[in-house]
Amino acid sequence: MDFDNSKPIYLQIVDFFYENILEKRWQEEERIPSVREVAMMVEVNPNTAIRAFNHLQDLEVIYNKRGIGYFVSQDGFSKVLEIKRREFMEQTLPDVFKKMSLMDIPFDELKNAYNQQKKK
Amino acid sequence: MLTLKQLQFHYPNSRPVLKSVNLSFKPGGIYGLFGKNGEGKSTLMKLVSGLLNPKMGLCSLKGRSTQSRSVATLRDLFLVPEDFELPGLPIQTYEKVHSSFYPNFSKETFYNLIEEFRLSPNQVISRLSFGQKKKVLIALGLAANTPLLLMDEPTNGLDIPSKSQLRRILASYVDDGKCIIIATHQVRDLHSLIDHVVILDNAQVIFDSPLSDVSEKLWFGKASKENEASALFSESTFGGKAIFPREDRDESEIDLELLFNAVLTEPTQINTLLNSINHG
């Protein structure tokens, strides 16, 4: 995994989990790789991987079955969707709007670009 | 697990390499030992493993002085040195000779690593390249399963895919009972694995802190006109990377190289902030 320099590694691992859940590579109620396996996959200290697991457990995206391992929650997919949507609305969009006003791009132009992209 | 108390050392007729070094290492962590060339990293490792005798002070592993080189101590540690001479033996013979010294030696781990490193057990070690020899030693060190593993510049001589392999292997290797100390200049090679940083400068320890404290107290970002004044340290280039007190900012990723440079130039400022008690 290539790390982005601005975001803590554990949050980048969280993003990696989100991606797997949204793309349905990891299904709800399915067992996911262990802390050690994830640490190996992304080549990080297991302590960093544990932080990612704890974070996701706090958000109820995954849960732990004692002695068996970690599983995607029953409503894990919709939980992730909600988190990512909020992230998009609160972080990505304001950024786009800021750039639009900086470059003086009218909203209609954005709308056209969106419609064209959709047609493809 | 490992304690260094007022450790002092100098080579004959030369300035002190280490003066009054106090350090304590706990199991379950990967320690990164940094310092400029000639600041005593390798000397420290040799003192810890009993290859050199301190002029003063004590180094003890699980309560036993490593200076005495007792069997009980030597089987609890393994040093992968930076440079070495290895005999003209096939890898498997070399393994047989050395594995008997380590009660928890895992032949399975050793031969898996040898295979992963694309070596074969009957190759004669003296005919291997430097990087391949290093791999043999790394495999031996990991397979020895000792509570303390010391590695001096482990990524030196390794090709690019092997560095990634080493990271993967180390990630799977740490557990609550083991302590790993890695001395390196190649901060980028292993930064995602290290969770505690020790920096040596001018024969002394000038920084000793878990990275969790660093990310709690410091913020790594870009310098701009607005925040310039509050920066603890910044690179000279305009818009360069800088370190700030974190305050209520979101956690940022630690830039070890930047931290290293900052500690060398502003040791007191950085340390004071790290040792400050949280107001929140």
Image (cartoon, rainbow, N blue to C red):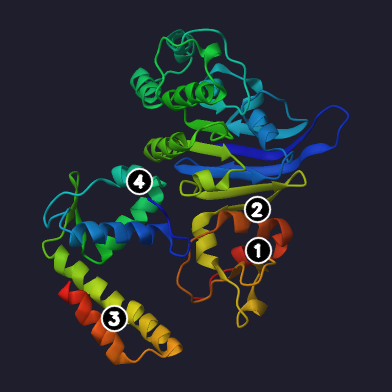
| A97 is higher (above) or lower (below) than B58 | below
Chain letter of the residue beneath label 3 in the structure image: A
In primary-sequence order, the first of circles 3 and 4 is 4
Residue B195: x, y in percent?
A: 49, 49
Chain of the residue under label 1 = B
Q: Secondary structure at mark 2?
A: strand
Q: Locate residue B95: give its quadrant.
A: top left
Amino acid at the residue labelled 3: Met
Query: Element at badge 3?
Result: helix
Q: Which residue is mark 2?
A: B207
Which residue does the image show at 40% across and 13% down from the upper left?
B121
- Tell me if label 1 and label 4 are in contact, CB under 8 Å: no
Q: Is residue B62 visible?
A: no
Q: Are marks 3 and 2 on the same chain?
A: no
Mark closer to the chain start, 2 or 1: 2
Labels 2 & 1 near each other (Cβ < 8 A): yes
Q: Residues within 10 Å of mark 1 (few under 14, many from 20)?
A: many
Q: CA distance from mark 3 to mark 2?
A: 41 Å
Using residue B256 as the reference point, say whether residue B103 is left or right of it: left
Q: Residue furthest right?
A: B13
Residue bearing the label numbered 4? A39
Of the residues tagged 3 and 1, which is closer to the observer? Answer: 3
Describe residue A7's horizontal placement relative to residue B208 as left or right.
left
Report the side of B259 relative to B28 (left or right): right
Say the numbered circle drawn on residue A89: 3
Residue B269: percent from the left, percent from the top? 69, 66
Residue identified by numbered label 1:
B270
What kind of residue is marked 4? Answer: Ala
Q: Dot 4 lies on which element?
A: helix
Q: Position of residue B30 (x, y in %)?
A: 49, 43
